[in-house]
Image (cartoon, rainbow, N blue to C red):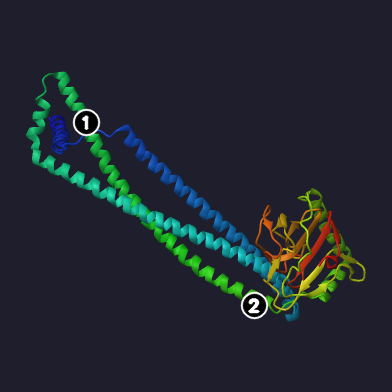
C-alpha cells in the first residue's frame, strides 16, 4: 500500500513539472550542442586555472631560488672577521647583489601582473555565474509555482488519460525526462553557487598574496636604490685587482686561460657579415675617458689584458654605446660572480672587425639586432671578475684581440 502511494506521489510530482513546463511554452529537452558547450566551458575554465596555478608556482620558485643566492652572498659577507674585510666583501659582491635584486624585481612584477589578471578574470566569472544563477532560479521558481497551482488531479489526468498502454509508456518517459532535466537544473544551481564561493576565496587569497608582493617589491626597489648609491662611490681598483690576481697567481692564470679559450671558441663559430661598415670607432662610454687598465701585459707580466678598462666616479649604470654600426652576434646575460667577463656582448662590424663589451650591469639589445654607431647597447657594471664598475672594451680583427686605442 505504501509503495503504491509513493509511486502515485512520484508520478504526481513529475506530471506537475510537465504541466509547469507546458504552461511556460518551454521544452524539457537539453540539446547535445548545449550540453557540449557547457562541458567545453567547464573544461576550458579548468585548463585556465591549471595554467595559472602552474605559472604562479613557477614564479614563486624562481623568486625562492634568487633569494637563496642573495642569502648565500649575505652569508659570505657576514663571514668576514673584521670591518675592513667586510667592506671589501661588500664591494666585491655588490654587483652580484644588484643583478639578483633586479631579477627579483622582474619576477615580482610578473607575479603582480599575473595576480591582477587572475583577480579580474575571477570577478568577471563571478558576475557571469551570478547571472546564470538568477536566470535558472527564476525559471525554477516559476516551475514550482506552476506545479503547486496545477495540483495532483491534472497530473493524474495526464497519466491516466492515455489512449492505450503504449501512449501511457510514452507519457511516462516524457515525464521522467522532465524530472531528470529539473534535477540537473537544481544541481547546476548548487554547483554554480559552490563555484562562486570558491572563486571568492581564490580572489581573497590572491589579494593577500598581491598585497604582500607589492610590499616586497617596494622593499626591493628601496634596496636596489641603496645598492646603486653605493656603486656611485666606487671606481675600478686596479691595485686591488692585481693583489687579488697575484694572491693565487697559478689558479687565476688557469682561469683566465679558460676564459680566453671560451672567447676564442665563440669567435671561431662567428661569421663576419661582409665588408667592414667603415668609419672610425667611437669611444664606448661617453663622458668617461679614464683608463684604469691598458691593453697588454700587466701584474708583473703575469696577465695579458686583451682590451682596455674604462672607469670613473659615478660610472655605474652609465650608458655604453656601440663603437660602430653592426650586428649583435653574441650576448651573455648569466654569469658566475668573480669569474670572467660577467655580462657581455659582441658586435660584428663586417670585414672581420668586431667589438666586445664586458662586465656590464645590463644589456639592452639581443642577438640578431642591428645597431647604429653611438646607439645605447648596455650599461656599465662590475659583473664577473672585477673590483669596481668599469667597461672592459675590446676590438678584435678576425677573432684576434688588438689594442683598441689604435682604432679609437
Residue located at (64% from left, 74% from top)? 228
> With 400 as the anchor, is 322 left or right in this view?
left
- Which residue is nearer to you in this view: 230 or 159? 230
SS under mark 1: helix
Against 213, is 177 above or below? above
Q: Position of residue 295 (x, y in %)?
A: 86, 67
Residue located at (64% from left, 77% from top)? 229
Q: Position of residue 370 (x, y in %)?
A: 68, 55
Against 322, is 140 above or below? above
> With 292 as the anchor, is 188 left or right in this view?
left
Q: Position of residue 209 (x, y in %)?
A: 47, 63
Pair 2/1: label in front: 2
Q: Is residue 121 visible?
A: yes
Query: Which corner quadrant of the image does residue 166 belong to?
Result: top left
Q: Is residue 202 visible?
A: no
Please identify the residue farthest to the left as the structure is shown. Answer: 153
Pointer 2 residue: 229
Pointer 1 residue: 176
Number of numbered markers = 2
Residue 70 tag number: none
Question: Quadrant location of the C terminus?
Answer: bottom right
> With 45 as the anchor, is 151 left or right in this view?
left
- Which residue is nearer to you in this view: 33 or 16? 33
Label 2, label 1: how far apart the Cα atoms are: 78 Å
SS under mark 2: helix
Q: Position of residue 277 (x, y in %)?
A: 76, 56
- Which residue is nearer to you in this view: 315 or 282? 282
Question: Quadrant location of the N terminus?
Answer: top left
Amino acid at each position: 500500500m505504501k509503495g503504491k502511494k509513493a509511486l502515485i506521489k512520484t508520478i504526481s510530482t513529475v506530471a506537475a513539472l510537465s504541466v509547469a513546463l507546458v504552461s511556460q511554452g518551454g521544452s524539457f529537452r537539453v540539446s547535445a550542442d548545449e550540453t557540449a558547450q557547457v562541458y567545453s566551458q567547464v573544461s576550458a575554465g579548468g585548463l585556465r586555472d591549471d595554467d595559472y596555478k602552474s605559472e604562479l608556482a613557477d614564479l614563486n620558485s624562481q623568486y625562492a631560488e634568487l633569494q637563496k643566492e642573495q642569502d648565500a652572498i649575505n652569508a659570505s659577507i657576514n663571514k668576514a672577521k673584521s670591518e675592513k674585510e667586510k667592506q671589501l666583501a661588500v664591494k666585491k659582491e655588490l654587483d652580484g647583489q644588484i643583478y639578483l635584486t633586479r631579477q627579483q624585481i622582474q619576477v615580482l612584477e610578473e607575479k603582480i601582473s599575473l595576480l591582477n589578471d587572475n583577480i579580474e578574470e575571477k570577478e568577471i566569472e563571478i558576475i557571469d555565474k551570478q547571472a546564470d544563477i538568477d536566470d535558472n532560479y527564476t525559471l525554477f521558481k516559476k516551475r514550482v509555482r506552476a506545479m503547486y497551482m496545477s495540483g495532483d488531479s491534472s497530473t493524474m489526468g495526464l497519466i491516466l488519460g492515455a489512449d492505450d498502454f503504449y501512449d501511457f509508456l510514452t507519457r511516462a518517459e516524457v515525464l521522467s525526462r522532465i524530472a531528470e532535466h529539473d534535477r540537473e537544473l537544481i544541481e547546476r544551481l548548487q554547483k554554480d553557487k559552490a563555484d562562486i564561493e570558491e572563486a571568492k576565496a581564490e580572489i581573497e587569497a590572491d589579494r593577500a598574496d598581491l598585497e604582500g608582493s607589492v610590499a616586497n617589491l617596494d622593499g626591493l626597489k628601496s634596496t636596489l636604490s641603496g645598492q646603486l648609491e653605493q656603486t656611485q662611490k666606487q671606481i675600478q681598483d686596479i691595485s686591488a685587482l692585481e693583489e687579488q690576481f697575484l694572491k693565487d697567481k697559478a689558479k687565476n692564470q688557469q682561469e683566465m686561460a679558460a676564459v680566453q679559450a671560451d672567447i676564442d671558441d665563440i669567435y671561431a663559430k662567428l661569421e663576419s657579415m661582409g665588408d667592414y661598415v667603415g668609419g672610425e670607432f667611437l669611444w664606448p662610454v661617453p663622458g668617461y675617458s679614464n683608463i684604469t687598465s691598458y691593453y697588454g701585459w700587466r701584474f708583473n707580466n703575469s696577465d695579458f689584458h686583451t682590451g682596455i678598462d674604462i672607469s670613473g666616479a659615478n660610472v655605474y649604470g652609465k650608458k655604453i654605446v656601440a663603437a660602430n654600426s653592426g650586428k649583435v652576434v653574441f650576448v651573455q646575460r648569466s654569469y658566475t660572480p668573480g669569474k670572467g667577463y660577467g655580462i657581455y656582448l659582441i658586435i660584428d662590424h663586417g670585414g672581420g672587425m668586431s667589438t666586445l663589451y664586458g662586465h656590464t650591469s645590463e644589456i639592452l639589445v639581443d642577438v640578431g639586432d642591428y645597431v647604429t654607431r653611438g646607439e645605447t647597447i648596455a650599461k656599465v657594471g662590475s659583473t664577473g671578475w672585477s673590483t669596481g664598475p668599469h667597461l672592459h672594451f675590446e676590438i678584435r680583427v678576425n677573432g684576434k684581440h688588438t689594442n683598441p686605442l689604435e682604432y679609437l
